[in-house]
Image (tube, rainbow, N blue to C red):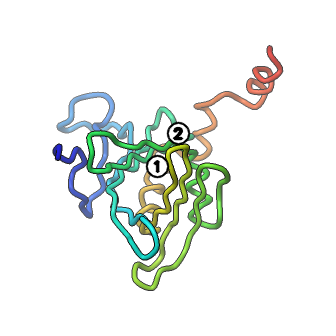
Amino acid sequence: MPPDPLPAPSSAPLAATPTGGDEAGSTAAPAAVEEVLTLRISLGEEVVGEVRTRFRFDAERPYEVLLTFHLGRPDEADWVFSRDLLRDGLRSLSGQGDVKLWPAYCPCHGSTLHLALESPHGSALLEVSKPRVQAWLDRTYALVSEEAEQAYGPTDAQLSALLAGG
């Protein structure tokens, strides 16, 4: 089996190398917020496994979050969806189609977030610690606030013009 490319989970969150300057002594804000969490995955009735997953937020793409599932093989499965979808899923049922998220309470694991993912290759139901995801998400908003996020994408007028063919 190839070596595991994800570092072992720890209680300390991971952050990307800060932008500008050198790694030692740089005070610039980090360009990304990353954390590796272990998610429980339903593999069938009463069969539960674990999959280590990297949560990544890039300040240059503030509308999206990237989840990389390390499956213990050379390949990894990446899922990209909106940061708003994740935020809303921590509060109530959110999403439609390929990605659905909702909060739950598990007597064994406490407050959790469920992720239901669908693709042409199959589906998965995953569960992760809601407080850990919320803490990670809070760090993304500290890096790029909801208000500042508006400056990174096209305006409604630009999108309307694009969709109208202009």
* 135 sits to left or right of 96: left
Instruction: Indicate the secondary structure of the residue bearing disc 2.
Output: loop
User: Mark 2 vs mark 1: which is more N-terminal?
Assistant: 2
Q: Which one is nearer the viewer's eye here, 27 or 79?
A: 79
Q: Mark 2 highlights which residue?
A: 62
Q: Would you place residue 113 above or below residue 74 in this image? A: below
Question: Please, what is the three-letter code of the amino acid marked with disc 1?
Answer: Thr
Percent of width and height locating residue 122? 51, 50
Instruction: Indicate the secondary structure of the residue bearing disc 1.
Output: helix
Q: Mark 1 highlights which residue?
A: 140
Residue at 22 percent of width and 44 percent of height? 5
* 107 sits to left or right of 12: right
Neighbour tally class for label 2: few under 14, some 14-19, many 20 plus, Cα within 10 Å: many
Neighbour tally class for label 1: few under 14, some 14-19, many 20 plus, Cα within 10 Å: many
Q: Specify the quadrant of the image occupied by residue 128.
A: bottom left
Q: Quick one: quadrant of the C terminus? A: top right
Percent of width and height locating residue 98? 60, 49
Percent of width and height locating residue 150? 63, 37
Percent of width and height locating residue 67? 43, 47
Tag 2 and tag 1, C-beta contact below 8 Å: yes
The image shows a total of numbered marks equal to 2
Question: Please, what is the three-letter code of the amino acid marked with disc 2?
Answer: Pro
